[in-house]
Image: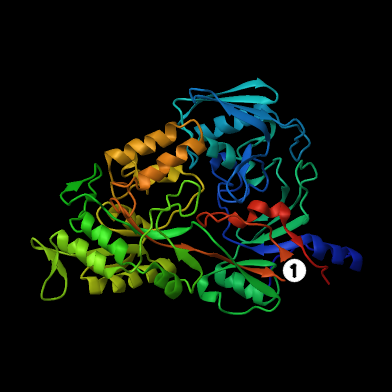
Amino acid sequence: MGLLLTACTSPNASSTDVDQDKKDHLILAIGGEPEEGFDPTAGWGRYGSPLFQSTLLKRDKEFNIEYDLADSYDVSEDGLVWTVKLRDDVHFSDGEQLTAEDVAFTFETAAASGSVIDLTILDKVKVVDPNTVQFFLEKPQSTFVQSLIATGIVPKHAYGENYNENPIGSGPFMLEQWDKGQQLIVKANPEYYGEFPYFTNLTFLFLSEDAAFAAANAGEVDIASISPQLASQDVSGMELVALESVDNRGVMFPVKPEGKETDQGLPIGNDVTADKAIRKAINIAIDRQSLVDGVLGGYGTPAYTENDGLPWWNSESTTQDGNFERAEQILSEAGWSKNRDGVLEKDGLVAKFTLLYPADDQIRQSLSIALADMMEPLGIMLQAEGKSWNEIERLQHSTPVMMGFGNYNPMESFNLFSSETQGEGWYNAGLYSNATVDSYLEQALEASSETEAVQYWQKAQWDGETGYGLKGDAAWAWLVNLNHLYLVRDGLDIGAQKVQPHGHGWPITDVITEWQWTEERE
């Protein structure tokens, strides 16, 4: 298998140089190519490390907030003004000092970009002095802190239309070469102010999971991201590392009855899944561990919410899995009974619906088929059907969909379950609405800090009487959280990893400066 490794050695390198290169250089096949490039104002770096840029704040492995470029920050009593003090020893890779002007420029550019970065809450940014910047919000929003955590800072003096292909930043690495469709070569940034990386040269290969596995088998990569289907096969000289995640898969239910259309003429509603008893019964009858074992080969965990285990997760939003007796009781009390074909029926409505999944996603297909098999004895008939994302987008307000989310930002809960976001892109596609939940979500946003907001995020899931979670309105049936699986070269320590987010980007690189060999390489 021929791979491009132009950064590894020069033709005239001595044996000593080659040995050192092997020690300091890693070859990685850990995910797809960032086709949009490496511009944080357009979304680069939201999952894992921005690599070339630094952020104002960051999270440790327990999700506590720590300083990075920031020396301190505080929020005004009314929650509208966030003041950030910067450390004064940071330089970009071109030697220019990073100042508040660069921070302001970054956020102003991101706000105007129309990209996946949502800064609509931001009114203006003010440079107070070279090391102090203030963010003025249109209204209080506790989740604004995530923007300070996830947005890499770009240099005002060196930013242009081709920045995404030639990034300059203050992060631990610099881009050396990008062969589109093949590989990315980076080297350590000598100006980096933080812990200098052990590995001074990295090559990222853009390979499919099957190709990455083949490269690992051939001894051509040091880390390879692989699928659960390949995890049972031993690879000489490499260890399988399974990282827990909130990279979840679950069923989004349309909760409105049939009969209406969107402004674009798309159908709204599903009479079967509009019945809360159907949604709750499915949630209670699911054997999630069976799905983890059967579909994921054991490489995952049962999922009950969109944020299992994160600080804002409500641990009460769980249930006893596979409880058919309770599920049957809920359905019976709601007026559902089996007809002569063994299918539930109520007032002439038969408990049948289609479950859509993206046709090119093997895991979602397997989960959909397994769930259909699981629900049949209960009398709920699911027809799993694969379609393109374009087709799914047109049908998602009327047909349940096997979707996936998982983010370090609690704003994801707001986006998925707030009345304000009904039908916005892929968010709240089921058009869910609950006034009590809306109130909790608003209180979470308006809290003065993430710590204060947690109680409201949790109550939105379940407050003892209502919520969007499975004990309340059961707007989704979450199924599994995937393990992110990597083959890692023996002796390579990839640091203490956090619970991983949804699988976009390269989340494993979040602590890349901690990676090192734990034994001498031959």
Q: Bin the neighbour count of mark 1 within 10 Å (Cα to Cα): few under 14, some 14-19, many 20 and up.
A: some
Q: Is residue 206 left or right of residue 384?
A: right
* Residue 93 against residue 227 in the figure, above or below: above
* Residue 149 against residue 121 in the figure, above or below: below
Q: How many marks?
A: 1
Looking at the rendered structure, the secondary structure element under dot 1 is loop
Q: Is residue 335 left or right of residue 85?
A: left
Identify the image quadrant of the N terminus: bottom right
Residue 451's x, y, as percent? 51, 38
Q: Which residue is mark 1?
A: 491
Name the residue: 79% across, 36% down.
95
Q: Is residue 257 left or right of residue 360?
A: left
* Residue 290 against residue 164 in the figure, above or below: below
Name the residue: 51% across, 75% down.
229
Residue 73's x, y, as percent? 62, 30
Identify the image quadrant of the C terminus: bottom right
Q: Furthest-front residue in view?
A: 464
Instruction: Give whichever of 193, 11 is nearer the camera.
Output: 193
Whether residue 506 is visible here, answered yes or no, is no
Q: Furthest-left residue in view?
A: 347
Whether residue 200 is visible here, answered yes or no, is yes
Residue 391's x, y, as percent? 32, 57
Which quadrant holds residue 457? top left
Residue 69's x, y, as percent? 68, 36
Which quadrant holds residue 383? bottom left
- The amino acid type found where label 1 is placed reads Gly
Which quadrant holds residue 459? top left
Name the residue: 75% across, 68% down.
491
